Structures are given as C-alpha cells and as structure tokens.
Image (cartoon, rainbow, N blue to C red):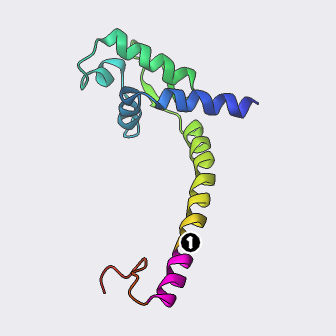
C-alpha cells in the first residue's frame, strides 16, 4: 500500500508542467529557489509551492549551505514510476508483435498488403 501511495504522489507531482520543468532543471545540478524561479513568469512563492509538492512526493530534497537551501533531484521515486510504466511498455510491445504477425499473415495471403518494415520497398 505504501508503494501505491508513493506512486500516486509521484504522478500527481509530475502532472504539472512547471514541476516537470523544475525537475528537468535539477537534473543538471542543484539550484536555489531563486535560480529555479528565474525562467518562469510566476512569483517566487508560487515556485515555493511547487517545490513543496515535489518535496512531499520525495522527488526533491533541500540542503543547507549557510543562507542558501539548494534543491536537488531525488531519483528513487522516478525510478519506481519508470518501473511501473515499464510493465505497460512490455504489454504494448507484445500487442505490436501480434499485429506484425497478423500483417505478415495477411501479406502472405494477399501479396499487395504492405507490412511493418516494407515502407522503403
């Protein structure tokens, strides 16, 4: 149940494009709130609210360096979300393989039917 709650928090946090952009920025290294707010046309308090959501989801953490509290990306929740999505990737790969097999059968029956990989011929 705890893993499900964490996954819910991760996807809820990732639902917002500003939060995804903040995570993308943090993938290149730590940043302060001011540095994270710079590219956005929203207020610093609004950025702080986004950071609280990301921190609550475990996607970021904040350190302390004198007066500065740099934010850093925490990858574990993202890797758990990726593992969850991976199951569906396997499902769709199986579906596409079955579709390819069906199209190959149709091509064998009707030679004029194009199948995957025949685009260049």
Residue at x-position 38% and y-position 37%: 24
**In the picture, which quadrant includes the N terminus?**
top right
The kind of secondary structure element at disc 1 is helix
Is residue 65 visible to the viewer in this orientation of the structure? no
* Percent of width and height locating residue 64: 47, 18
Give yes or no for residue 104 being in the magenta stretch.
Answer: yes
Q: Tell me where residue 108 appears, x and y as whole percent.
A: 50, 90
Question: Where is 116 relative to 21, above or below?
Answer: below
What residue sits 30% from the left and 18% below the top?
34
Considering only vertical position in the picture, is 52 above or below 12?
above
Position of residue 83 relative to residue 58, above or below, is below
In this image, 64 relative to 33: left or right?
right
- Residue 23 found in image quarter: top left
Q: Locate the C terminus by quadrant.
A: bottom left
Where does residue 52 sit, x and y in percent of width and height?
49, 16
Viewer-proximal residue among 40 and 97: 97
Give the left or right position of residue 46, taking residue 101 as reference: left
Query: Where on the picture, by quarter, is residue 5?
Result: top right
Q: Is residue 97 visible?
A: yes
93 in magenta: no
Query: Which residue is rendered at x = 73% and y = 29% of the image?
Result: 2
Dominant SS in magenta: helix
Which portion, as a residue range, is magenta? 100-110
Residue extending farthest to the top is 45
Q: Which residue is mark 1?
A: 97
């Amino acid at each position: 149940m705890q893993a499900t709650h964490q996954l819910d928090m991760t996807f809820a946090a990732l639902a917002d494009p500003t939060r995804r952009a903040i995570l993308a920025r943090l993938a290149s290294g730590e940043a302060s709130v001011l540095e994270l707010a710079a590219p956005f046309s929203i207020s610093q308090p609004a950025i702080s609210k986004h950071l609280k959501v990301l921190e609550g989801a475990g996607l970021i953490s904040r350190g302390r360096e004198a007066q500065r509290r740099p934010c850093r990306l925490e990858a574990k929740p993202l890797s758990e979300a990726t593992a969850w999505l991976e199951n569906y990737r396997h499902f769709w790969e199986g579906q596409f393989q079955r579709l390819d097999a069906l199209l190959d059968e149709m091509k064998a029956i009707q030679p004029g039917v194009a199948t995957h990989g025949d685009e260049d011929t």
